[in-house]
Amino acid sequence: MATILRCRYVITGLGAFGSVGLLQTYWRPGTSPGSTADATDVSTRANQAYFGLGVSYQQVREVDALDDATGALTGAFTSAALATVFGSASGDQMPAQTAYVVKATTNLLVGPRLLKGRTFFAGPTESINAVAGVPSTGSVTGVAAGFTGMLTGGGTASFPVIWHRPGGAAAPVGTSGPVISYQVESNYWGSQRGRRF
């Protein structure tokens, strides 16, 4: 069992009708079972942006502490207030479900497979949609740099993890593994059909 922190940002202004989304990341706190300093650190490092005008990412100040083995809520910490992040890319908004696919890798084996994760990072505009209908090279580089920046440079020793939820024959007990790298898919846009909280 390990404590993990759940950090969230509410996304507003997506697509032509201003849809709402959620960016959610998981972290191992620098000091178990977590602290206000850890909550502020992870919220600050998750505060990365590369999206269009009219899109904003608003911090949820309550950072939940969870038992990664069961998913049970074990506590919560209130982060310092951070400024809302506003997009700066020009051009028409792409559909709300259009997102960069950010792939995270770990060194942790769960059953016969390495634990990996994906984040759907929404809010791109037509100006960063290449001629072939794929993310532009510059925007892929920018998003990758933003996510990679979460791995270092924090105010605490907290670090991002991928959480494998409990359940299934391969892992009836949940676990989490440190992220060692992020990559952004350059060959297509992603679309997340459902979300688990």
Image (cartoon, helix red, strand yellow):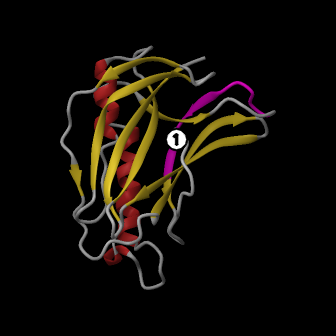
Establish if 29 lies above or below 153. above
Q: Position of residue 148 (x, y in %)?
A: 40, 48
Q: Quadrant of the N terminus?
A: top right
Question: Any magenta on residue 102?
Answer: no
Question: Any magenta on residue 178?
Answer: yes
Extent of the magenta region: 170-182
Q: Nearer the viewer, residue 14 or 7?
A: 14
Residue at the spot 32% in from the left edge and 39% down from the top edge: 45
Q: Residue furthest bottom?
A: 131
Q: Residue furthest front?
A: 17
Q: Is residue 108 left or right of residue 54?
A: right
Residue at the spot 44% in from the left edge and 39% down from the top edge: 25
**How many numbered badges does the structure rendering display?**
1
Which amino acid type corresponds to the residue marked 1 in the rendered image? Ile
Dot 1 falls on a residue whose secondary structure is loop
Residue at the spot 44% in from the left edge and 41% down from the top edge: 24
**Location of residue 44 by image quarter:** top left
Q: Nearer the viewer, residue 135 or 108?
A: 135
Q: Position of residue 53 (x, y in %)?
A: 23, 65
Establish if 21 lies above or below 7. below
Q: Position of residue 22 (x, y in %)?
A: 41, 47
Few, some or many residues within 10 Å of mark 1 (<14, 14–19, 20+): some
Q: Is residue 13 left or right of residue 158?
A: left
In the picture of the structure, the residue carrying the numbered disc 1 is 180
